[in-house]
Amino acid sequence: LHGRVAAFMSEVNFGCRLKAAESAAIAALLGDDGRTIEVNTLAGLSALETLIIVADKLTSIHSAALKELTSLKCLEIDAPTLTSSIAEPPIFNSLGLLEELTLRYVKLSLVNNLARAFRGLAKLKKLSLDHNDLTNLNFLSAEPGCLAGLAELQIDGNDIGLIKPDTFSNQAALETLSVSGNVRLAKVNTKAFGHMAKLKCLSLEQNNIRTIYLHFLNDLAALETLVLSGNPIGRVEWEKSQKCVSQLKNLYFDGDQTALFVPLLRDLPNLKTI
């Protein structure tokens, strides 16, 4: 992390150090003492393109704290005590050029209207929401057009219990999707992936899936990699469509499940790695 920081500036009232000059492209707020990012903490950093915030005791970010960051393209926040202040009122809405957003160890399950937090992020291409105590993905389809431009979505290490048919109805442009490491995730409605014509990589590893319905492969002509490792799969449902022209090249599952996947392997002529 420190290797990505460009320069050093003096102490700020956040209680940690802002490691960037006013003209720098990269800055980081690092420390465990700061509890709030005030309205002036990031003042004068209109040229900033990347901001990294790592703070163990951060509880709130002022709703106007990011408003001057008009050039920001990449934002990472790692703050285990930060909760509803990201959406009430929303703090990201002024970041119209933001392309990458990472929220890690933020208690997003306590945010009442998570979809609201992502309004206005029309240029966002990559969203990572790992280890945020998320129990559902309803926010992805809660509002029409929500996060419609995403190319990469990663939601690993949460507490997701179900993927519904309309879960990713807004994210038809996705190329990479990972919903892994959710120990309660036992059921995946594969209709959720059927409209993703651009999807190239899908990871569902380290969940608790016991039956996997792979009919969605008939619709995902661009899919090259499917990761199912680490699931206690005991049943594989698959029926090839006559229209299916699968481009799947990489299929990963546990070694003791090979016999379950044999019927599928015969219908994947482009497969290179298992």
Image (cartoon, helix red, strand yellow):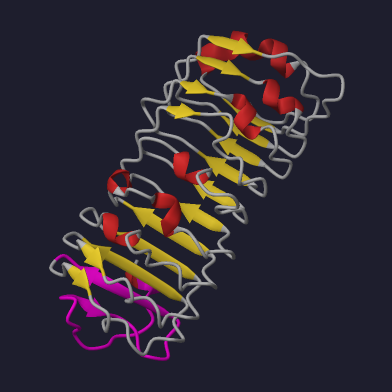
Residue 224 x %, y %? 70, 37
How many numbered dots are placed on residues in this image?
A: 0
Is residue 248 shown left or right of residue 202? Answer: right
Residue 148 x %, y %? 61, 53
Q: Is residue 16 magenta?
A: yes
Looking at the picture, tell me which residue is in the foreground, 86 or 23: 86
Residue for point 47% across, 75% down: 72
Residue extent of the magenta highlight = 3-32
Magenta region, mostly helix, strand or loop?
Answer: loop
Looking at the picture, tell me which residue is in the foreground, 99 or 2: 99
Residue for point 69% across, 14% down: 238
Is residue 72 shown left or right of residue 3? Answer: right
Is residue 246 shown left or right of residue 121? Answer: right
Looking at the picture, tell me which residue is in the foreground, 9 or 270: 9
Residue 47 x %, y %? 46, 86
Q: Is residue 95 magenta?
A: no
Tell me the quarter of the picture where residue 75 sits: bottom left
Residue 205 x %, y %? 48, 30
Point out the image quarter for the C terminus: top right
Q: Residue furthest right?
A: 242
Is residue 162 shown left or right of residue 194? Answer: left
In the image, is residue 26 above or below residue 214? below
Residue for point 52% across, 40% down: 178
Point out the image quarter for the N terminus: bottom left
